[in-house]
């Protein structure tokens, strides 16, 4: 559902001493938390169980970092390590019964690394710098390991998966988006595309729009300057997650989701297909999960500044580290300011972002995380809709790429306020319990005026008018999720189980204002400059919306170790959904996935996932139609190569959504339009993706997608191209050119089309041509602390467009742009 014209749907500083660092972080985190509503919670580190405790482990051979992470997860402990130092190290795996420290010792044998212990957990240090752990006192007065200065530190015991920051990799380690079980991409029986922190940094992906453009199998349709819609497998993506907690977006009344700044996130995960097990209701195409950055025990920080085309400027700061000697309290703050102009006449947008998070080890096994973030997006000269596709003669209405249909006072301000908290407890038997709460406000304040109505006469520019309106509103979302996961033994084998429950409440309030008597006629469309009188409303809303939606769910999933090579993941969610028009309970979303290891590097998999979407449409008897039912069936191959540094997948999917509402021409008992439920959209296709390191210093993320979506044998969702290809790659030079990193990106999509209103021919099909876009980047590291990056987007200056059928408009893509960025790390 899209908004109608009258309803828009908004220099190096002296080194910090430890005391100065703690003080700075304490003050910054306190300021961050003071801006949040509720407090928040997150992941925890924990020391070992009792020294005599042993358990059975079956860790496959692979990268040492991955093996350590899997062992830590199964043992219920945490370990901090320098991810960069382990990139080239491989583990032979571990099989049998081990105590925690014996297991770590076996995995680390021959690696040159040893295990140290702090009061907060475990730590990896060079073997030559520490005595054997068993000889160390249980609580040393000063732990040598604790004083080690690590470079890029990763806390691996993380129920959201492995942190990508500092790995320099374009592929993730373990992830938990699909089932809450922390699994590698190869162990996850669904297609998951992940854009890591390194890829975002290399190509200056400062917004979610930038990330989605680089994500295989996902496309973007532009409504106007402040609104975009994402599509995957034939369906719009309205389901977002923040650290795995679902929040639903209303694209018509846009309120900050797609304008989100990426400075506060470690990675962006896109889970393809139906995701009802964890999200509850929604569309079956995909879910986007944004995983926040976490505090680090070792101090790290950076500041950056950039400048680019059209007077675009940005500054960013990021500080993280321990706030006490033991490292049991850690904090992180991120701030970003951006003033972005564009190729559009009289348009600019300023953005402010702040993020603060604290982690505290309440006990050796219990972690509390509280945090908050906010973002303000303040545009001037916002467009509303795009350029009419046709002029009054029925021909293509060609306009320059700089044309802005918005009045100079037009704006669609959007903002986000989030408070989050997590409490996590590690049990000695490998089980973990976690409670997470997320409170988010997405709001907008839009005063919009745009020359968007009608079709211009090419002779004198007459025939068009302004759309005019004011809309003020916000969506307040509260979500609570609690679950427990861990191993259990059945028939002589160890398996994994997760059980959980979630509650969500979402309230949308909206006030709309009209401007009677305002002259909306545009005398000359081709002479439009946005210089029109400022409208004044009566101050009283002409209409209001107030909707409250509640969802509840119970879910469970088990990963059954059927044999050494065969794993089954089975589960389900039972949900209820209620608002003023709908009251549904007992909705079941089953989940099933089977993974068979063909070789130590290659697996075959199949999965069946579902999701539901309630609807308020009624039939001629006044009965509300059953929820739309989304089902995704997928089979494919997944591989982990080059000691786990490279992941690849190939999938065939068959997706369908049934109970689609079709108008019957009749009326409901209350006089409304009557509908009947029919077979809905069926989408079929293939997806191929590869990400990671092809050779030392050479990173790659590439993918190809082909899909066809039909409804009653007619192609639908054609604004989304049927074929897409993307490739992003960088190479770190060596020898005499050491310090240079060169890279590029290429995106191609096939033609797309949609129905549009033609004043001469009536409804007709308008097609956009296929196109390539090329991006380039080059970075030089003057020192380990200082670097400069040059980026050129759309380097070939390709002229391309997207079409929005609902408005019968088109929008030009951004021309060539250049950006220079300086980063200083300390």
Image (cartoon, grey):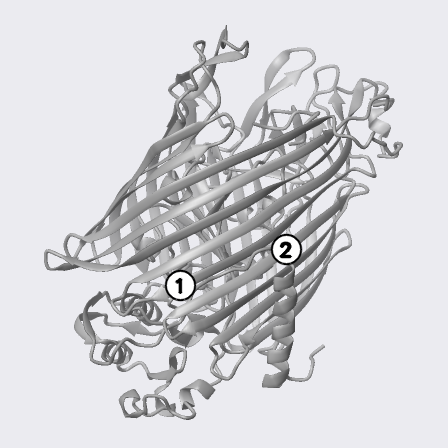
Q: Is residue 720 left or right of residue 534?
A: left
Q: Position of residue 778 (x, y in %)?
A: 60, 63
**Nearest to N terminus: mark 2 or mark 1:** 2
Q: Position of residue 378 (x, y in %)?
A: 74, 48
Q: Which mark is residue 218?
A: none
Mark 1 neighbour density, 10 Å: few (under 14) some (14–19) many (20 or more): many
Say which of marks 2 and 1 sits in front: 1
In which quadrant of the rendered view does residue 680 lie?
top left
The residue where tag 2 is placed is 374
- Height in image: 621 above or below 661? above
Which quadrant is the N terminus positioned in? top right
As rendered, which of 678 and 537 lies closer to the eye?
537
Dot 1 falls on a residue whose secondary structure is strand
Tell me how far mark 2 sits from mark 1, CA to CA. Answer: 24 Å
- In this picture, is 403 found above or below 79? above
Q: In the rendered image of this protein, does residue 509 appear above or below residue 63?
A: above
Which of the 4 image quarters holds residue 8? top right
Q: What residue is shown with label 1?
A: 424
Residue 547 horizontal/vertical position (percent) = 57, 32
In the rendered structure, the answer to whether residue 102 lies left or right of residue 397 reads left
Could you tell me which secondary element the residue under label 2 belongs to?
Answer: strand
């Amino acid at each position: 559902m899209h908004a109608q014209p009258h309803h828009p749907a908004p220099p190096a500083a002296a080194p910090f001493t430890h005391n100065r660092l703690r003080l700075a972080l304490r003050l910054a985190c306190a300021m961050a938390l003071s801006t949040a509503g509720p407090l928040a919670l997150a992941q925890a580190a924990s020391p070992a169980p009792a020294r005599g405790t042993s358990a059975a482990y079956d860790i496959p051979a692979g990268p040492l970092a991955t093996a350590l992470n899997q062992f830590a997860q199964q043992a219920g402990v945490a370990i901090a390590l320098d991810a960069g130092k382990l990139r080239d190290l491989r583990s032979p795996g571990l099989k049998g019964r081990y105590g925690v420290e014996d297991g770590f010792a076996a995995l680390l044998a021959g690696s040159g690394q040893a295990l140290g212990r702090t009061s907060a957990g475990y730590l990896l240090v060079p073997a030559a710098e520490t005595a054997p752990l068993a000889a160390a006192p249980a609580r040393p007065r000063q732990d040598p390991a604790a004083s080690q200065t690590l470079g890029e530190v990763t806390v691996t015991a993380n129920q959201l998966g492995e942190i990508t920051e500092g790995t320099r990799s374009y592929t993730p380690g373990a992830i938990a988006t699909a089932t809450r079980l922390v699994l590698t991409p190869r162990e996850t029986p669904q297609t998951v595309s992940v854009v890591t922190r390194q890829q975002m940094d290399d190509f200056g992906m400062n917004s979610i729009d930038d990330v989605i453009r680089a994500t295989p199998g996902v496309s973007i349709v532009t409504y106007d300057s402040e609104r975009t819609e994402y599509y995957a497998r034939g369906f719009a993506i309205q389901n977002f997650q923040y650290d795995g907690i679902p929040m639903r977006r209303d694209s018509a009344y846009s309120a900050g989701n797609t304008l989100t700044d990426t400075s506060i996130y470690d990675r962006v995960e896109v889970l393809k297909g139906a995701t009802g097990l964890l999200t509850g209701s929604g569309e079956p195409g995909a879910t986007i999960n944004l995983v926040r950055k976490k505090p680090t025990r070792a101090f790290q920080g950076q500041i950056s500044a950039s400048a680019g085309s059209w007077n675009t400027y940005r500054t960013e700061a990021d500080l993280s580290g321990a706030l006490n000697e033991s490292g049991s309290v850690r904090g992180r703050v991120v701030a970003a300011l951006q003033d972005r102009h564009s190729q559009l006449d009289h348009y600019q947008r300023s953005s402010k972002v702040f993020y603060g998070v604290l982690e505290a080890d309440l006990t050796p096994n219990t972690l509390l995380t509280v945090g908050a973030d906010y973002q303000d997006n303040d545009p001037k000269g916002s467009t509303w809709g795009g350029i009419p596709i046709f002029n009054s003669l029925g021909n293509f209405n060609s306009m320059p790429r700089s044309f802005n249909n918005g009045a100079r006072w037009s704006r669609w301000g959007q903002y986000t306020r989030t408070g989050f908290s997590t409490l996590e407890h590690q049990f000695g038997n490998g089980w973990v319990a976690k409670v997470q709460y997320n409170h988010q406000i997405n709001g907008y304040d839009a005063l919009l005026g745009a020359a968007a109505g009608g079709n211009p006469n090419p002779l004198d520019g007459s025939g068009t008018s302004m759309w005019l309106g004011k809309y003020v509103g916000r969506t307040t979302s509260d979500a609570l999720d609690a679950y427990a996961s861990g191993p259990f033994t059945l028939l002589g084998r160890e398996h994994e189980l997760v059980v959980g429950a979630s509650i969500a409440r979402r309230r949308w309030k909206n006030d709309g204002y009209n401007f009677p008597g305002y002259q909306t006629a545009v005398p000359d469309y081709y002479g439009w400059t946005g210089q029109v009188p400022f409208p004044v409303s009566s101050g009283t809303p002409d209409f209001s919306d107030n909707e409250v939606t509640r969802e509840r769910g119970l879910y469970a999933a088990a990963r059954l170790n059927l044999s050494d090579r065969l794993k089954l993941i089975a589960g389900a969610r039972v949900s209820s959904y209620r608002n003023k028009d709908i009251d549904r309970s007992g909705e079941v979303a089953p989940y099933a996935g089977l993974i068979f290891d063909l070789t130590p590097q290659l697996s075959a998999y199949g999965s069946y996932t579902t999701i539901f979407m309630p609807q308020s449409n009624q039939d001629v008897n006044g009965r509300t139609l059953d929820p739309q039912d989304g089902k995704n069936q997928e089979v494919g191959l997944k591989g982990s190569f080059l000691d786990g540094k490279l992941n690849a997948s190939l999938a065939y999917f068959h997706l369908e959504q049934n109970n689609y509402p079709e108008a019957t021409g009749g009326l409901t008992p209350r006089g409304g339009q009557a509908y009947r439920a029919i077979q809905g959209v069926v989408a079929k296709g293939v997806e191929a993706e590869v990400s990671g390191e092809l050779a030392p210093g050479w990173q790659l993320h590439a993918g190809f997608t082909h899909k066809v979506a039909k409804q009653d044998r007619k192609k639908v969702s054609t604004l989304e191209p049927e074929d897409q290809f993307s490739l992003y790659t960088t190479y770190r030079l060596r020898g005499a050119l050491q310090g240079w990193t060169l890279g590029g990106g290429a995106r191609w999509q096939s033609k797309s089309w949609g129905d549009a209103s033609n004043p001469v021919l009536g409804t007709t099909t308008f097609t956009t041509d296929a196109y390539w876009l090329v991006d380039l980047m080059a970075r030089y590291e003057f020192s380990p602390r200082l670097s400069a990056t040059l980026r050129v987007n759309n380097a070939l200056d390709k002229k391309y467009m997207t079409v929005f059928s609902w408005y019968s408009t088109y929008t030009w893509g951004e021309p060539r742009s250049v950006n220079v960025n300086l980063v200083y790390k300390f």
